[in-house]
Image: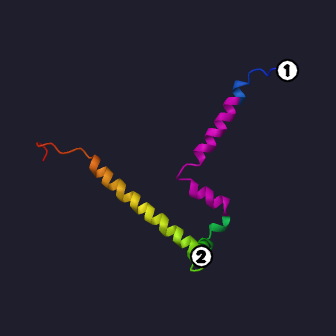
């Protein structure tokens, strides 16, 4: 009938977890740009990256321009909100410090 599988080997499991942890550490925020350039070698040359940017922002691509403007407007609104929120949460000065 059904044969149960025993406990997994702890050293094998530990090795797999260590490998997974190392891969997560290797893709830190600072390393992401270099990893992306390694994955997409066409963007290593500045001319290719600028051509792609011009294609996205070019006059023929009106949908993308409107989307970028909308994202920028949303971003500016969030920045203004958080600036006011941070200022409002600042503790009031005491009479002795003023």
* Region in magenta: 13-40
Q: Residues within 10 Å of mark 1 (few under 14, many from 20)?
A: few
Q: Position of residue 26 (x, y in %)?
A: 60, 47
Of mark 1 and mark 2, the one earlier in the sequence is 1
Q: Is residue 93 left or right of residue 49?
A: left
Residue at numbered disc 2: 61
The residue at the point 11 percent across, 43 percent down is 95
The quadrant in which residue 92 appears is top left
Question: How much space separates mark 1 and mark 2, taking CA atoms?
Answer: 61 Å
Q: Residue furthest left?
A: 96
For label 1, the SS is loop
Q: What secondary structure is marked by label 2? A: loop
What residue is shown with label 1?
2
Going by the picture, which residue comes out furthest to the right?
Answer: 1
Locate the N terminus and report the quarter of the image it occupies: top right
Q: Is residue 93 positioned above or below 71 on the image?
A: above
Q: Position of residue 41 (x, y in %)?
A: 67, 64
Residue 18 included in the magenta stretch of the image: yes
Which residue is more in the foreground, 53 or 32? 53
Left or right: residue 18 versus residue 28 is right
Residue 37 is one of the magenta-drawn residues: yes
Which of 47/6 is in front?
6
Check contact, mark 1 vs mark 2: CB within 8 A: no
Residue 71 in the image: above or below residue 86: below
- Residue 55 percent coordinates (x, y): 61, 75
On residue 12, which mark appears? none
Q: Is residue 74 left or right of residue 87?
A: right
């Amino acid at each position: 009938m059904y044969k149960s599988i025993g406990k997994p080997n702890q050293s094998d499991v530990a090795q797999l977890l260590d490998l997974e942890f190392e891969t997560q550490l290797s893709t830190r925020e600072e390393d992401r740009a270099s990893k992306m350039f390694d994955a997409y070698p066409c963007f290593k040359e500045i001319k290719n990256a600028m051509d792609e940017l011009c294609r996205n922002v070019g006059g023929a691509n009106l949908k993308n321009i409107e989307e970028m403007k909308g994202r920028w407007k949303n971003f500016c609104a969030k920045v203004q909100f958080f600036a006011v929120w941070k200022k409002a949460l600042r503790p009031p000065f005491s009479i002795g410090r003023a």
